[in-house]
């Protein structure tokens, strides 16, 4: 999946096309409805021209890197791959909760150390989803809290001030000793989306960051950096195999 900055030419072309009956319509297994319209010829070429400058990878970066590697290795002169393109104005981001599985955690000590620099206040479970940046939902040994990061500890640049980086640099690393979130076996990631409750695992500490914005993701990419691991969950998400091109078996 790829994203592009809002483009009025593309938006008008899509709006004009979808005003007619869809070429394909179906209901997916999860109950969601899908409608597809073909855009061909000059109209399609005009839309493609709008994407020559920049596109942002929102999902599938490992697959894209692998495809790029294979194309280079095989010397393909005109490699292509299928992708879904989404306007930045129509994308929504969710976050991944961090679950620390470590029965040896001293909860009282963790709470005391957090409160040395930050605000940690008890809340009800219904209030656990953060409502603004630099705010986190927290659960420690079954008790729920709201964590607010101390303003004086928030860096000025976009990348280091991402909520997931603040959580890693100010909480998970110094308080739990999790220096490498990619490989630490104590750290699990749970997507904040409908049905995620079924994926919950027993853990001693649970942190839910406020989701990054699409603008933040693009700014980070424009700086030549990559987003931290498990920092974004984009929606809508196309079902796997929604569009398949049959290869000539001969």
Image: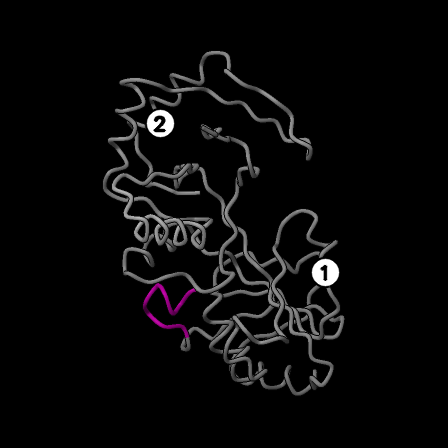
Question: Horizontally, is 97 left or right of 158 in the view?
Answer: right
- Please tell me how crowded label 2 is: few (under 14), some (14-19), or many (20+) other residues with Cα within 10 Å: few
Instruction: Give the image location of residue 226, x and y in percent.
Output: 37, 61
Residue occupying the point 27% across, 39% down: 78
Residue occupying the point 43% across, 73% down: 151
Q: Nearer the viewer, mark 2 or mark 1?
A: 1
* Residue 50 vertical placement versus 58 (above, below): above
Stretch in magenta: 154-162
Q: Which residue is mark 2?
A: 11
Q: Nearer the viewer, residue 68 or 155?
A: 68
* Residue 98 vertical placement versus 15 (above, below): below
Instruction: Give the image location of residue 136, x and y in percent.
Output: 57, 65
- Please tell me how crowded label 1 is: few (under 14), some (14-19), or many (20+) other residues with Cα within 10 Å: few
* Residue 105 vertical placement versus 181 (above, below): below
183 magenta-colored: no
Mark 2 falls on what kind of element? helix
Q: Which residue is mark 1?
A: 200
Most extreme residue toward the front is 250
Mark 1 falls on what kind of element? loop
Residue occupying the point 69% across, 32% down: 29
User: Which label's residue is closer to the chain start, 2 or 1?
Assistant: 2
Instruction: Give the image location of residue 11, x and y in percent.
Output: 35, 27
Mark 2 to mark 1: distance in Å? 39 Å
Most extreme residue toward the top is 20
Q: Quadrant location of the C terminus?
A: top left
Instruction: Give the image location of residue 174, x and y in percent.
Output: 52, 84
């Amino acid at each position: 999946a790829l994203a592009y900055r809002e483009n009025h030419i593309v938006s008008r072309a899509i709006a004009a096309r979808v005003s007619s009956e869809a070429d394909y319509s179906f209901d997916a297994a999860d109950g969601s409805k899908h409608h597809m319209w073909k855009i061909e010829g000059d109209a399609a070429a005009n839309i493609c021209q709008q994407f020559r400058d920049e596109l942002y990878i929102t999902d599938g970066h490992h697959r894209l890197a692998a495809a790029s590697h294979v194309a280079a290795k095989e010397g393909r002169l005109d490699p292509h791959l299928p992708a879904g393109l989404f306007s930045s104005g129509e994308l929504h981001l969710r976050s991944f909760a961090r679950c620390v599985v470590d029965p040896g955690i001293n909860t009282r000590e963790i709470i005391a150390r957090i409160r040395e620099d930050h605000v940690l206040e008890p809340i009800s479970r219904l209030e656990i989803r953060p409502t603004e940046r630099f705010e986190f939902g927290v659960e420690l040994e079954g008790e729920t809290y709201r964590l607010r990061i101390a303003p004086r500890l928030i860096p000025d640049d976009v990348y280091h001030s991402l909520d997931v980086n603040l959580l890693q640099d100010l909480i998970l690393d110094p308080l739990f000793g999790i220096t490498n979130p990619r490989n630490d076996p104590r750290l699990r990631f749970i997507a904040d989306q409908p049905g995620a409750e079924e994926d919950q695992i027993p853990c001693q500490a649970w942190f839910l960051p406020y989701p990054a914005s699409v603008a933040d993701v693009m700014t980070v990419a424009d700086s030549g950096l990559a987003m931290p691991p498990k920092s974004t969950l984009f929606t809508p998400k196309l079902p796997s195999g929604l569009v398949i091109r049959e290869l000539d078996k001969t």
